[in-house]
């Protein structure tokens, strides 16, 4: 699955099917669907924001286990700033807080683009794409 949208679309299709009441649903199934609906929005947001899932699914990485000596295991946002020598915790432009495991590929973010933007009366306007640091 090379396209991140393909995975997300499949998950959303599955979730929609799980949330859709059917005329044949027994009471236990109606209750299950209700609980699923109440939880899905929170879970879907967490999935869409997860740098870890991006690395595991699309980047081919394994779960990182060594805390970065610079960022101390704390996700520190997305940045085009240069990376300190002792830090190997980037995933594209995301600063993960966890050092890359030996042998893992140096993967890039699957669906993030860093842009420089300016505020206008109409809202934020992208003015240039910024290449991630290497």
Image (cartoon, helix red, strand yellow):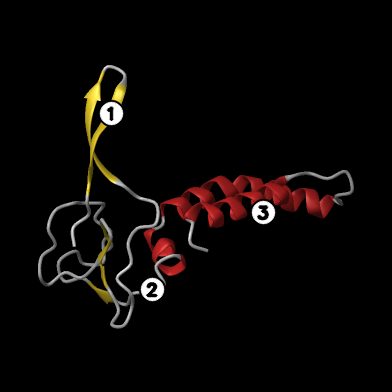
Foreground disc of the pair 1, 2: 1
* SS label for mark 2: loop
Q: CA distance from mark 1 to mark 2?
A: 34 Å
Q: Are marks 2 and 3 in contact (CB under 8 Å)?
A: no
Q: Is residue 12 above or below residue 72?
A: above
Residue under circle 1?
Answer: 125
Disc with the residue nearer the chain's start (2 vs 3): 3
Percent across and percent down for residue 123 are 31, 23
Q: Please determine whether, in this image, residue 66 is positioned above or below residue 83.
A: below
Question: At 80% from the left edge and 53% from the top edge, which residue is drawn?
Answer: 29
- Rate crowding at label 3 as few (under 14), some (14 to 19) or many (20 or more) other CA atoms within 10 Å: few
Q: Residue furthest left?
A: 85
Residue drawn where x is 33% and y is 67% of the image? 107
Crowding at dot 2, Cα within 10 Å, few <14 / some 14-19 / many 20+, comes out as: some
Q: Between marks 2 and 3, how big is the CA–CA gap?
A: 25 Å
User: Which residue carries the number 3 mark?
Assistant: 14
């Amino acid at each position: 699955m090379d396209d991140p949208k393909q995975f997300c679309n499949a998950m959303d299709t599955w979730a929609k099917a799980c949330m859709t009441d059917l005329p044949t649903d027994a009471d236990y199934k109606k209750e299950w669907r209700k609980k699923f609906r109440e939880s899905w929005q929170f879970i879907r947001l967490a999935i869409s924001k997860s740098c870890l899932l991006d690395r595991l699914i699309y980047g081919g990485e394994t779960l990182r286990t060594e805390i970065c000596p610079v960022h101390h295991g704390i996700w520190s946002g997305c940045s085009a700033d240069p990376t300190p020598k002792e830090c190997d915790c980037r995933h594209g432009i995301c600063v993960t807080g966890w050092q890359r495991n030996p042998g893992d590929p140096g993967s890039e973010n699957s669906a993030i683009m860093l842009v420089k933007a300016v505020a206008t009366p109409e809202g934020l306007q992208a003015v240039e794409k910024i290449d991630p640091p290497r």
